[in-house]
Image: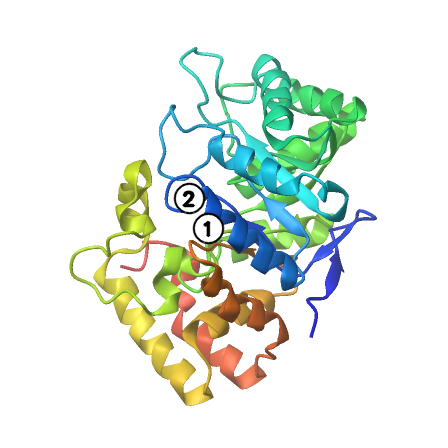
Amino acid sequence: MAIPKIPFGRTGLKVSRLALGTMTFGLQTDESVAKRILDRAAEGGINFLDTADVYPLGGTLDTVGRTEEIVGRWLQGRRQHYIVATKAVGVTGPNDWDKGASRKHLLEAIDHSLKRLGTDYVDLYQLHSDDESTPLDETIEALDVIVKSGRARYVGVSNFLAWRLATALGRADFLRLTRFVSVQPRYSLLFREIERELLPLCQAEGLAVIPYNPLAGGMLTGKHKGGAPTPGTRFTLGTAAGRYQDRYWNERAFESVTQLGKLADQAGVSLTRLALAWVLANPAITAPLLGASKPEQLDETLAAADYKLDADLKAELDKLTHEYRYGDSVR
């Protein structure tokens, strides 16, 4: 069965129910493998690709932009068939202004991204994180210029707290400027905090939600067994290793994965498919971002689009991971 298309929030755009994240391309995954991953995603029905100017994950200033370049080369001759999203705000150079959400940086960053991607526009331009040192009005005005110049069709945010997003939406409406249409938060069975405030806000405002880390950096594939972090994964990858170990490499997470694995076995389905189907079952979710370092890793995640999660099983999953709605406060 082909992956269905779904409205992108309240916009007139439709995207595939699953999206491909590309942050492994260029460091964890070389270009030849990355192109095979893109081919496999396309064959599976994915038309929504997400990247960022600072990728690849785990890289340094020497690798900034490499992922966009790889995606751009693959897109040549087929750009019109894909929804392309990228992000800015992260550090891309040695100067103080080579980061953040200032007018200066965003207007330069979009041009650099377009050049690397080999395209005249991106469909979605996102703030990779919240730059609280720059006034929201300045950021919103810069993004409005980018959209009205035709360099982006829509704008969104990633890693925003609900109150900051609500404030930004209010300022855009008051100033009659281009409004954010999407959010890209972290979300999985092992990280559910956004259910409390962010997701209700998104539903109320009609925002698309494209969560990253739906498999908790690979923890919810069941392949990690504890001990020393697994070589060749995000848990040992350059500058990203510490971040991923802090997020997931702990006794609490491993205990949860073991329990979740038992439920998956009882249901006769892989933990990977079950975990992704759980994310898809949330009505606030538009298109989870699939990550892969090898083409074959997409087989189980693509299959999740067809898997119908039983209501009783979903209730068990909700109960088992309820503590992750509250971060570390319950430890």
Which corner quadrant holds the C terminus? bottom left
Answer whether labels 2 and 1 touch (C-beta < 8 Å).
Answer: yes
Identify the residue shown where x is 56% and y is 22%.
101
Marking on residue 30: 2
Residue that sits furthest to the left in the current view: 227
Type of amino acid at the residue the image marks with label 2: Asp
**Relative image position of residue 9 (x, y in whole percent):** 74, 51
The relative height of residue 47 versus residue 320 in the rendered view (above or below) is above
Q: Quadrant of residue 271?
A: bottom left
Pointer 1 residue = 33
**Residue drawn at the location 44% of the way across and 28% of the way down:** 64
Left or right placement of residue 271 versus residue 330 in this view: right
Q: Is residue 52 visible?
A: no
Drawn side of residue 169 relative to residue 10, left or right? left
Alpha-carbon neighbours of circle 2 within 10 Å: few (<14), some, or many (≥20)?
A: some
Viewer-nearest residue: 139 or 78: 78
Question: Number of labelled discs?
Answer: 2
Kind of residue indicated by mark 1: Val
Give the answer, above or below, for where 235 lies relative to 281. above
